[in-house]
Amino acid sequence: MLAMVKNEYGNIIDLEKYSTDGRLTEPSDGKIFDYRKMLEVIEQLGRPLTEKEAEQYRIK
């Protein structure tokens, strides 16, 4: 059952207590890619691109 139905609010993790700053994700590495072109190739191949293949679509 859902926690709200059982009123078990004490089991919720307090994220603010464990976060060091306001971010919920890792900082960006600064790489920018042309995702539209990458998506076209991914659909043709039927698999994700490798790191080496993805570097071809990096915007410098």
Image (cartoon, rainbow, N blue to C red):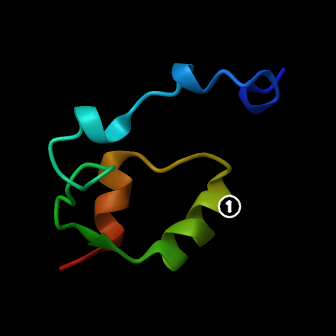
Residue 41 left/right relative to 25: right
Say which quadrant the N terminus sits in. Answer: top right
Q: Nearer the viewer, residue 6 or 55?
A: 6
Residue at the spot x=67%, y=61% of the render? 44
Identify whether 51 is placed above or below 39. above
Residue 19 x %, y % = 23, 40
Residue at the spot x=36%, y=37% of the render? 15
Say which quadrant the C terminus sits in. Answer: bottom left
Residue 32 left/right relative to 2: left
Residue 37 x %, y % = 51, 76
Q: Three-letter amino acid code at disc 1?
A: Glu
Residue at the spot x=37%, y=55% of the render? 53
Report which residue position mark 1 lands on. 43
Estimate how packed mark 1 is, as few (under 14), some (14 to 19) or many (20 or more) residues with alpha carbons within 10 Å: few
In the picture, residue 30 is in which quadrant? bottom left
Q: Nearer the viewer, residue 13 or 40?
A: 13
Residue 24 x %, y % = 33, 49
Q: Secondary structure at mark 1?
A: helix
Identify whether 50 is placed above or below 3. below
